[in-house]
């Protein structure tokens, strides 16, 4: 890979590209209409920020940063919610550049720290984050919510 990686904010016009990146990240496809509605809503949210990495005009990666005031820190925290680099661009510093952008944005906004979570099965990602200075300090627990059926909503 040659050339300079440029970063820019994502816009609504990037919906197709961002959808493809998220599908790559999760190795799955999602309800496209729901994705479009959610992406548009997130772009309008002042504490959510998406940045794209481009090489020669082609999008090769993305990061999502959510700035939140945590009461238990009594300070701002930058949560990296998504970070994905296309397979052909991995190993060339794209992920590091995206992380650096998010960390600097959070720092300038007064955040105490940045944090992220990743699947317990993503060993390459774990090594990457540790090389970038992230430490395993917490456990994250999840619980899927059952969908409401029509009978639950209309008795």
Image (tube, rainbow, N blue to C red):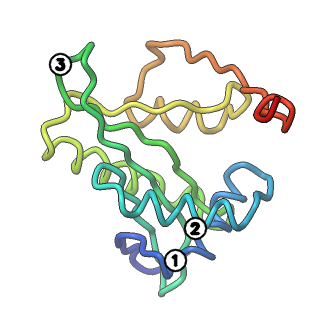
Mark 1 secondary-structure assignment: helix
In-front residue for pair 83/64: 64
Q: Nearer the viewer, residue 106 or 86?
A: 106
Q: Quadrant of the C terminus?
A: top right
| Residue marked by disc 1 | 14
Q: Residue at x 65, y 38 (%)?
A: 124
CA gap between label 3 and label 2 equals 33 Å
Q: Which residue is mark 2?
A: 18
Q: Earlier in the sequence, mark 3 or mark 1?
A: 1
Q: Earlier in the sequence, mark 3 or mark 2?
A: 2
Q: Position of residue 114 (x, y in %)?
A: 32, 33
Q: Nearer the viewer, residue 146 or 16?
A: 146
Classify 104 as above or below 58: above
Residue 51 vertical placement versus 147 (above, below): below
- Res. 74 mark: 3
- The answer for how far apart the CA atoms under marks 1 and 2 are is 6 Å
Q: Is residue 124 above or below residue 136?
A: below
């Amino acid at each position: 890979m040659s050339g300079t990686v440029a970063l820019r904010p994502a816009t609504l016009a990037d919906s197709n590209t961002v959808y493809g990146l998220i599908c790559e990240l999760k190795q799955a496809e999602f309800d496209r209409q729901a994705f479009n509605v959610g992406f548009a809503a997130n772009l309008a949210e002042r504490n959510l920020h998406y940045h794209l990495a481009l090489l020669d005009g082609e999008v090769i990666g993305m990061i999502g940063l959510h700035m939140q005031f945590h009461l238990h820190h009594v300070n701002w925290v930058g949560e990296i919610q998504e970070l994905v680099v296309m397979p052909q661009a991995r190993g060339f510093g794209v992920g590091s550049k995206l992380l650096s952008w998010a960390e600097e944005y959070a720092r300038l906004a007064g955040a105490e720290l940045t944090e992220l979570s990743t699947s317990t099965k993503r060993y390459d990602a774990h090594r990457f984050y540790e090389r970038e200075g992230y430490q395993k300090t917490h456990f994250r627990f999840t619980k899927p919510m059952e969908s409401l059926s029509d009978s639950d909503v209309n008795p």
